[in-house]
């Protein structure tokens, strides 16, 4: 059994804050601050450029990849870390399209994160070989898998509503139609057990700053199924994905397997923070995380629905059809969320009207959930959100 009191003690959470936004930016693991400081002073400071070899910096993307692989059901040597998630989406998509040259459709859905769609759109324009990005409603995906679809590009958990696709079933359907699959696990990795290999996914990508707590700007990960890894030709063919980067050949030759999905110099300070954040997962059973996340989410929904009749549940009612966040709608959602944050309950807002709350059992418990619902009720019943100061929008909502 996972000891959630012990995991909570490993995070540095400010006093008086109920943090229901670990699905957007995970909090600081105490060990990460010390690890980054050590990497700065002892490694960068003392070893200088020798850090690449003597501190193992160059192997960090593969090491972090294997550690994340254990959380998403990916065998050793099939995941590597680096760049941003948007970049990893582009890389995976370019590779997949090349493996299905005779097909021209990228199928996605309206619940996908816009950046994934923007990257697909940019790639289609760059290729200029007649590809089409086809976007359907989430419920229509299975039926839209026609014989012209090259790739199914989906985010497993909808960033707004928390609605979760059935990865195994849709992957099977895609394969039956002759298409490849790319799964964006931004809201899945660390949220519940994921089994990319078991589901037969061809590619998976995800970020490490949400449930994995790697810190702001932490690098992304990419998974390529074993059977494909030596067949993909990276579109972003940077020197660190080359078979022999330090041979400085003028011609690009892809590295073996997943190594070819590396691009350029890895962000060592971020990788140090991520490595410390991944230590928290040692001894954590993701099925315990899932059970507790459902308990917390169900409790929150029940409390909010009984206390706050003005809010409408935007997430699926069936917990099996959700990820690990819960959303409610209200036309004044932005101001309400600002008022909540001012009272120490941190969730976030997604346009046009979504109040989003993440349930992250590593550091959130039932007492937090009850208290958050009480404060939300107080704000709504007293209309304390109805002030100009709570309507002012900063860059990040
Ligand atoms: C589902 C999903 N995909 C892609 C992205 C974009 O990630 P990045 O900003 O790391 O490129 C995000 C960011 O939150 C996301 O939630």
Image: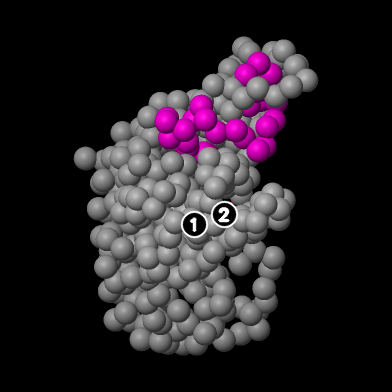
Q: Furthest-right residue in view?
A: 250
Left or right, residue 316 beside residue 390: left
What residue is pinned by disc 1?
148
The residue beneath circle 2 is 104
Render colour scheme: one colour
The foreground one among 291 and 172 is 172
* 270 drawn magenta: no
**Where is residue 48, by image quadrant?**
top right
Q: Position of residue 342 (x, y in %)?
A: 55, 70
Q: Quadrant of the C terminus?
A: bottom right
Numbered marks: total: 2
Q: Residues within 10 Å of mark 2 (few under 14, many from 20)?
A: some
Q: Secondary structure at mark 1?
A: loop
Q: Earlier in the sequence, mark 2 or mark 1?
A: 2
Q: CA–CA distance between discs 2 and 1?
A: 6 Å
Q: Contact (CB < 8 A) between labels 2 and 1?
A: yes
The region drawn magenta spans 220-245
Mark yes or no: residue 363 visible: no
């Amino acid at each position: 059994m996972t000891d959630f009191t012990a995991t909570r003690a490993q995070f540095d959470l400010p006093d008086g804050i109920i943090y229901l936004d670990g699905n957007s930016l995970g909090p600081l693991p105490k060990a990460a601050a010390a690890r980054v400081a050590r990497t700065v002073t002892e490694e960068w400071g003392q070893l200088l450029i020798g850090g690449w070899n003597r501190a193992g910096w160059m192997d960090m993307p593969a090491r972090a990849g294997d550690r994340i692989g254990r959380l998403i059901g990916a065998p050793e040597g099939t995941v590597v870390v680096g760049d941003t998630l948007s970049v990893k989406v582009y890389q995976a998509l370019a590779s997949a399209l090349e493996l299905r040259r005779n097909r021209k459709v990228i199928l996605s859905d309206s619940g996908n994160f816009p950046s994934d769609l923007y990257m697909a759109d940019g790639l289609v324009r760059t290729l200029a070989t007649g590809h089409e990005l086809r976007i359907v409603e989430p419920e229509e995906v299975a039926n839209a898998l026609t014989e012209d679809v090259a790739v199914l590009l989906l985010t497993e958990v909808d960033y707004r509503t928390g609605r979760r696709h059935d990865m195994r079933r849709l992957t099977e359907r895609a394969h039956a139609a002759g298409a490849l699959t790319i799964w964006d696990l931004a809201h899945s990795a660390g949220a519940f057990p994921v089994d990319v290999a078991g589901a037969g996914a061809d590619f998976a990508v995800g970020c490490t700053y949400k449930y994995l707590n790697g810190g702001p700007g932490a690098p992304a990960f990419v998974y390529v199924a074993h059977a494909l890894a030596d067949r993909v030709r990276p579109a972003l063919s940077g020197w660190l994905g080359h078979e022999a980067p330090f041979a400085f050949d003028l011609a690009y030759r892809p590295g073996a397997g997943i190594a070819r999905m590396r691009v350029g110099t890895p962000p060592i300070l971020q990788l140090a923070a991520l490595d410390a954040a991944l230590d928290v997962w040692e001894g954590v059973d993701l099925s315990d995380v899932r059970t507790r996340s459902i308990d917390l989410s169900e409790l929150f929904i029940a409390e909010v629905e009984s206390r706050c009749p003005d809010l409408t549940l935007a997430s699926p009612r069936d917990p099996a059809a959700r990820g690990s966040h819960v959303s409610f709608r209200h036309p004044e959602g932005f101001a309400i969320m600002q008022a909540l944050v001012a009272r120490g309950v941190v969730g976030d807002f997604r346009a046009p009207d979504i109040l989003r709350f993440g349930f992250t059992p590593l550091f959130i418990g039932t007492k937090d959930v009850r208290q958050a619902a009480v404060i939300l009720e107080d704000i709504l019943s007293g209309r304390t959100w109805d002030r100009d100061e709570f309507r002012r929008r900063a860059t990040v909502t």
